[in-house]
Image (spheres, rainbow, N blue to C red):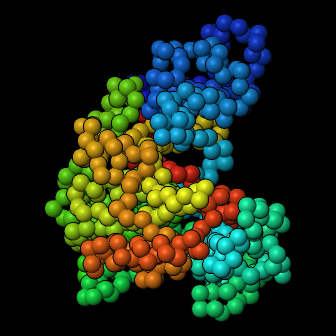
Amino acid sequence: MENKQSLILLFFILILGFSACKKEIKNPEKIDHDTKEDLIKDSVFYYTKFLSLWQEYMPPRNVDDILKQDVLRKYTQAFSSGEEVLYSLVKLTPNDPLTNRPIDRFSFLDRDGEISGEMQGIATTSFGVTFFFLQDSEERNRYDLSVQMVDKASPAYTAGMRRGDKVLSINGDDKIVSVYGDNPEDPLLGKYLTAGSMIIKFVNKKGVIIEKEITSGTFIPNPILADNILDLAGKKVGYLAFNSFLNIDESVGTNGEGGVFVKTDMYHAFEKVFKNFESAGVDELVVDLRYNGGGSVLTAEYLADKIVPSAMDKKLMYTNQVNGTLESWGWLDEGDEFGPVYFSKKGHLNLRRVYFLVTSATASASELLMNVLEPHMEVYIVGTYSNRDGNQIADNTYGKPVGFFGIPIVDPKIELYVTSFMTINSDNNKGGKSSKRYDGGEYFGGMKPDAHVWEFGSFADFGDKEESMLSAALNHIQTGSFESLTRSISKVASSNMRKERPKSHIQIGGSKLKNGMYKFPKRNLLK
């Protein structure tokens, strides 16, 4: 605890401009005064060194030397911003053999406090729709602006927009809704889609043409894209699609034990979904995480407790790994924030197996949920293909077995997220054991699905039985095989697939969350 207190103490010293440590500066003439950015740079270096999972790759060799301001300033004075300091440290982490780039591609500095705000489900202002360009089924050189997903609480949803709709024009302009070959989208499109309002004409899956004026509005995001119960040859299949792991607890104050928390709207929404599943007597479960980049670790644990079989109650869910300094401080001890996590079965679902729908965008807390369930029940994962340089690629998930927690630095709105912990499921908690999903106890290369389909072989809304990925899972529930459906979808894939280049993927009011696994503790980790 003493070391944790020294960590927070130096944080306040950084805020106050190192006034108590000025006498230790060997070259005081070089520092006439500390600017706000000086303090940000020093804070970034200090916390990254102390918290990084790859601490031993970063200077100084003796971690205690970082407590000396002259040592700290020696490393930071050459950089112009906190981001530059962070990048310089991230570059020192070991190379990922899969990418030949530094393995820490995750740490970042949030200067606007957007991440913690969004994790708590704070209201956003937007149209609430995500667009992307989809290859035309007949004119293969053409890509048309289409609707990927719509927030149920948004103005776009109220206007009738749904996944699978094709945009015909915006503000009467029908030339900017299509691109050809590798041509970039028209810059005017971005202006239309970020304006306060727009007149949009689109055609839905039934062939009905709709024209509406939509005004950007303020709403609380609803990550649940769809939930329903499907009848399948005498079985009841629960289906749940959601696009982020928003926090299920919200801090509303403090007390002597470190905080007062209440349940969020996200918690109550999940509770409603699972109570419906229980009341209906759901036999099978399909969880759609295809666009889910992660979020709160506590939410992943909550969902794992909902899904895991009752017999697994009190069994080990996962352990964490942190750097040697934090481990020596007891952060991995039983009952501590990063101590072992055990299942605490919630609800009455007692499933034998679960299906997950994923893409290469499925990351972090999503991967954690799948990984912790794998040793305790049958887990089937349906993934997608992509087309890169003319080659068909069977995609894994994103690959992020690590996470972070926000550290406010200098300004309450500025938060540093340093990759600080790695999660390891119960099969791999002693290290070394391989999984059918990945080699060893880590999955930086992503988790390998059991089967792959072309996502847009049948481009239907979430929860539609005809939608390609859901259909593959349902086929396996019925027949025990993905093969027949996978083949039928592959035949039409080349004429109906998502354009892979990022320049042809436009998000309006989409999540600002980076692919992340965010630890939101029940008490301040630095106390």
Image position of 138 with respect to 99: above or below: below
Please tell me in which quadrant of the rendered image residue 431 appears: top left
Please tell me in which quadrant of the rendered image residue 416 appears: top right
| In this rendering, position of residue 420 left or right of residue 20 | left
| In this rendering, position of residue 271 left or right of residue 210 | left
Q: Nearer the viewer, residue 172 or 325?
A: 172
Please tell me in which quadrant of the rendered image residue 337 appears: top left
Which residue is farthest left?
Answer: 311
Residue 125, how many percent across, how many down?
68, 67
Image position of 75 with respect to 427: above or below: above
**Image quadrant in which the N terminus is located:** top left
Q: Say which residue appears at 59% left-offset and 74% top-offset.
A: 495
| In this rendering, position of residue 519 left or right of residue 349 | right
Q: Say which residue appears at 74% left-offset and 77% top-offset.
A: 215
Image position of 203 with respect to 23: above or below: below
Q: How many marks?
A: 0
Residue 368, how many percent across, how many down?
38, 52
Residue 128 visible in the shown view: no
Q: Say which residue appears at 49% left-offset and 63% top-offset.
A: 385
Q: Nearer the viewer, residue 123 or 489?
A: 489
Image position of 478 with respect to 299: above or below: below
Residue 424, how many percent across, how many down?
32, 44
Residue 335, how many percent across, how many down?
28, 41
Q: Nearer the viewer, residue 239 or 325?
A: 239
**Image quadrant in which the C terminus is located:** top left
Residue 176 visible in the shown view: yes
Q: Say which residue appears at 77% left-offset and 61% top-offset.
A: 184
Which residue is farthest top?
Answer: 26
